[in-house]
Amino acid sequence: MDDPANVEKQGDPQDFTEIERKAIERALRSHSLEEVKTAVQIIAAVADKRRDLYSLEQDCDERKKRQQSGLRRWLRSFADFLSPNVAAFAALATAIALISQVIIAGTTAKSQKQAQEDSQWRDAMKSVKLSAPDDALMGAFEMQSFFDSKQYGRHARSIVTTLLPEVEAPTGFDVVFFNLAHRVCNNTSQECAPDPALNAEIQQDLLGIGRMVAVHDRDLFESVVPEGCMGANCKAEKFRQFVKDPETFFPEKNPDKYQLGLAWSYSWELDSVSNAMIRLWSGPHRALQPQGTNLAGIVISGGDLSSTNFSGANLAGAHIWGAIVTDADFTGVPTPDDSDWQDTNWWRAKVMSCALANYLKAKFPPDSSHLEGTIRAEKLVQNCQPVEEH
């Protein structure tokens, strides 16, 4: 027979019933008072255990009821919240669906736009030719439509720098050249956000065009003899006068003399380049500085370049004619071999490299009758800054 202490280890109601049955049967068959007493103790222990198990089950039932009641209350609260807001949730779902459609449509439109631009670029490239001046102009017109393209803008500008120097028509040249110049953005503009890297790229493109036009025109001026040009009037130093007023040398433009007509047109293109760069470097529309740029061979005729920063610029072969450079900075400029500074009062600059100051003092000294200029020039040379060797 089970010991009453072992009853505590039991937990299954079926075990309790079996223990009770065995205890009762044993008590009925036994003639020993001790065995009957033990059986009664077992039956009592089972009864206590049943009572404890019942209480535990009751507690579990109550706990489940409370949990279920809480869940039902939460569900009712959620339902109460959801009911008046069904329309809002439906609107939200609709908005999400619309936004998704817009994103998908935008992606599709972007892909279609990209494919269309690719096709237009391939067609435009077919018009890029250098076989004749008119072809060069037509190609330049095609390329300017891609100046603002993120994918082809840089390529288009590079191609234009090759095409424009071959264009003979000043009007056509100006249309494309100033269209490119207007892509430079400054801080005073409300229509664009300045991009220093892009501005620097465009500046190099403009200077590259101007440099090649200057080379073409200088070569033409020195290789042909214009009508009425005799003796000293045809020397290289008269090039500035020719650029300023080509009709002095070509009183009647003769279309039959191709090189003369070409030189005449290039003289006006040089004027456009000069005006564009002066506008970008000075005045209320200043957007760029020529600091550290390659200005070799460029022509700048006239204009106010006061306080402009030319530090570190390459001025070899540059033509700075009749410009105002008051308080301009020319530090770090290496020896400007073959540069031409006719009628430019360079001694009014704020500071210069010693290489530039000594070159200008030797090649373009102030008039001896100009005392103020002589004093300023000497002071500028004395206070010059050495060019650092790298």
Image: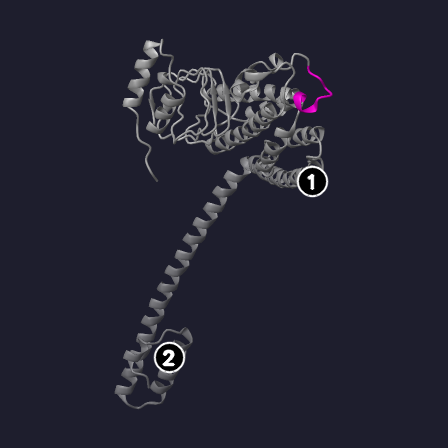
Q: Is residue 256 magenta?
A: yes
Q: Which residue is mark 2?
A: 20
Quadrant including the C terminus: top left
Q: Which residues are magenta?
A: 253-261
Q: In the picture provided, is 169 more to the left or to the right than 280?
A: right
Residue 377: x percent and y percent? Answer: 33, 17
Q: In the picture provided, is 100 more to the left or to the right than 133?
A: left
Give SS at disc 1: helix
Q: Which residue is mark 1?
A: 122
Q: Is residue 128 magenta?
A: no
- The residue sitting at the front extreme is 231
> Does residue 189 appear in the picture of this structure?
no
Q: Which residue is at 36% across, 68% downward?
A: 53
Give SS at disc 2: helix
Q: In the picture provided, is 248 more to the left or to the right than 34?
A: right
Type of amino acid under label 1: Arg
Instruction: Give whichever of 248, 185 is nearer the camera.
Output: 248
Picture quadrant where residue 304 is located: top left
Instruction: Give whichever of 292, 88 is nearer the camera.
Output: 292
- The residue sitting at the right extreme is 256
Q: Which residue is at 30% across, 28% downward?
A: 385
Instruction: Give whichever of 343, 160 is nearer the camera.
Output: 343
Mark found first going from the N terminus, 1 or 2: 2
Instruction: Give whichever of 277, 381 is nearer the camera.
Output: 381
- Distance of mark 1 from mark 2, alpha carbons? 100 Å
